[in-house]
Image (cartoon, rainbow, N blue to C red):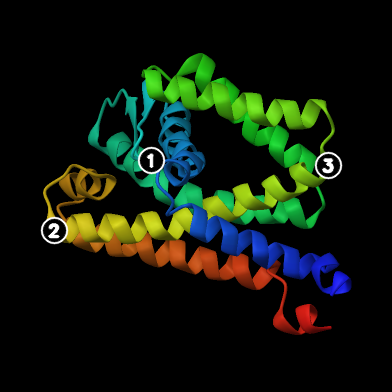
Amino acid sequence: MITFFNNESIQFYLILLTVWITIYIPYIGKYIRLISTMIHEGGHVWMGWMLGEKTVKINLFSNAGGEASVTISNKFKKLLIAIAGYPLTALMAFFSFWLLSKDLHVYYIIGIVSISFLFLLLYFRNFFGIIWAVTFISINVCLLYFHYHLLIHILAQAYACIILLESVFSCFILMYVSFTSNITSDASNIASVLYLPKQFIAILFTAFNVYMAYVTITHFFPTLNHIIN
């Protein structure tokens, strides 16, 4: 029994299952989902920066949503900036597990904290977003400072799982919203430029992120045979 729970593959799937359950728990679930939201909004910011546009602010909300306000000088830039969010989250999930496969858990946590700190200094402007960033950074800095290696290892895997799961779940939410409401979204912003149905755009986002999740799982998740052995 001790050997069973010392198996790193078993530990990984326990972490994945715990994350899957936790994201549906009120308050704490929305809190941890904001890690993925930050990455998503960071995609818009990064693309805007690449195109020479200015990021005005990023807001994070208590419902785990977010918005990035980026200046847009033409429709082509609007298109690229709107596209960047969902795919970057999927790519970040792949990159996260790649880093963990190289046993770079500490550096991964440092990277996530650095992104949070940079956004806190430059972009977070609403009260909830600031509080979230301060608490998230504080928790992780304490773990790094006091060298809680086991917790760092567990949290690094948990963060990667959160980003992976949310990269898929958020796309299904986008599809649902696109088919049932007129809420402004990345899909509707893209549709306004390409003159395509926003539902079609949402389906494309979902297809890409599901594919990237499949690639991530097949490359980095332990196999069942590995667990049994």
- The alpha-carbon separation of the residues under discs 2 and 1 comes to 20 Å
- The alpha-carbon separation of the residues under discs 2 and 3 comes to 45 Å
- The alpha-carbon separation of the residues under discs 1 and 3 comes to 28 Å
Image depth: mark 2 or mark 3 in front: 3
Circle 3 Cα neighbour tier, 10 Å, few/some/many (<14 / 14–19 / ≥20): few
Which of 62/196 is in front?
62
Q: Secondary structure at mark 3?
A: helix
Name the N-terminal-most of marks 2 and 3.
3
Circle 1 Cα neighbour tier, 10 Å, few/some/many (<14 / 14–19 / ≥20): some
Instruction: Please name the amino acid that badge 3 sits on.
Output: His
Residue occupying the point 82% across, 51% down? 103
> Tag count in the figure?
3
The image quarter containing residue 19 is bottom right
Name the N-terminal-most of marks 1 and 3.
1
Q: Which residue is mark 3?
A: 149
Q: Give above or below for 81 relative to 195.
A: above
Instruction: Please name the amino acid that badge 1 sits on.
Output: Ala
Q: Which residue is mark 1?
A: 64
